[in-house]
Image: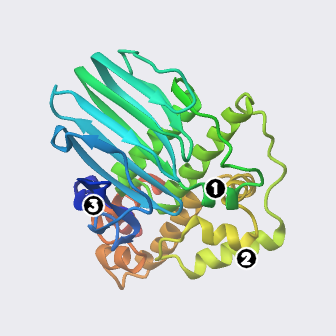
Amino acid sequence: MLMNSDSLRSRSLAARDGNQARQVPRLGRLDEADGLGAPARSIDMLAPTVRITPARAVTRRGMEWRGMGAEFVQATSHDRVEYSFRSPMHLLAAYEHGVRREGESYVEGLPRSTLRAVANKLTFAPAGHEYREWHDPRALTGVTYFYLDPAELHAEFDEDAAELAPRLFFEDPTIWSTAAKLKQAIQSPRTENRLYVEALGVVLVHELMRLNRGEPRGQVEIRGGLAAWQQRVVTTYVEEHLPEQIPLATLAQLARLSTYYFCRAFKQSFGVPPHRYHNQRRIEQAKILLAGRKHSVTEVGLTLGFSETSSFTATFRKITGQTPSGYWRNLG
């Protein structure tokens, strides 16, 4: 399950880059947390993260999940900062704020840019392309880096996800909105879960591919929901694993679809995304257990996979409009 924002700590390990020692952040993995709000072990990402010099000039924290990772980087001083990256991973940078007195940004294959106001801009460096920039900041820069594994993307989509074009300081409201939702979901896990994070990651990739094809938003049509057998096998699996955090990929595999098309088909069939359906079923089971009056609110929450009463209460109230205790009292 997801970690709360306080537990998203970055550690670092000494690594060698040529003859120069540097620090590579270590990010937590979604599936290594014990539950909502529980800390996760810190591990290496599947690929190097953006190199930042000097390292002391920023704070970094993040996490990774299947085929993707996200890292939040915040400048903490007005000293000159340099950023660089070249990897088999795709890199998407979403600049939340920042103004530089001087600076230069570069993505291999594109002209250099000296744009000063970078807030609300996006930069995309495809796998193997060099990304490099430096900032002499007037207003401190805050950026979210998304790392995307081309091998995973190719397996999920029917087209070659590796052939994506580089882009420097572009704007796309849909991509920006999805990236912002993804960051918020990771930072506020008490109201979200792993399925939601994975689904947002899939949507983010799809929107990048849409942009690459030059299609306007909404051009791709939904071609129907899940077949009866797909609905049956997926809902049965959810019912049998209610207390668990079910990976989106697991449900997609059961339906024999890519995660992207599964999410769209599932929502068309059930009217809600998979993560919301899962939570709704957990709360319906919680109602049954509360009505039996054999277990406390805390015990019911633990039985259904909530590691903290507060997270159980928040989810219960979001779905039913009342707290578990209030629901129990109203039963009479």
Q: Could you tell me which secondary element the residue under label 3 belongs to?
A: strand
**Foreground label between 3 and 2:** 3
> At 55% from the left edge and 60% from the top edge, which residue is drawn?
275
Would you name the residue on which mark 2 appears? 233
Q: Could you tell me which secondary element the residue under label 1 belongs to?
A: helix
**Foreground label between 1 and 2:** 1
x and y percent of residue 276 in the render? 55, 57
Relative to 256, say whether 99 is above or below.
Answer: above
Is residue 161 visible to the viewer in this orientation of the structure? yes
Query: Among all residues in the image, which is located at the extreme front?
Result: 19
Q: Are marks 3 and 2 in contact (CB under 8 Å)?
A: no
Q: Residues within 10 Å of mark 3 (few under 14, many from 20)?
A: few
Would you name the residue on which mark 3 appears? 15
Would you name the residue on which mark 1 appears? 153
Drawn side of residue 92 relative to residue 44, left or right: right
x and y percent of residue 235 in the render? 67, 72
> At 23% from the left edge and 59% from the top edge, which residue is drawn?
12
Q: Amino acid at mark 3?
A: Ala
Give the Cα separation between the discs numbered 1 and 2: 25 Å
Q: Amino acid at mark 1?
A: Leu
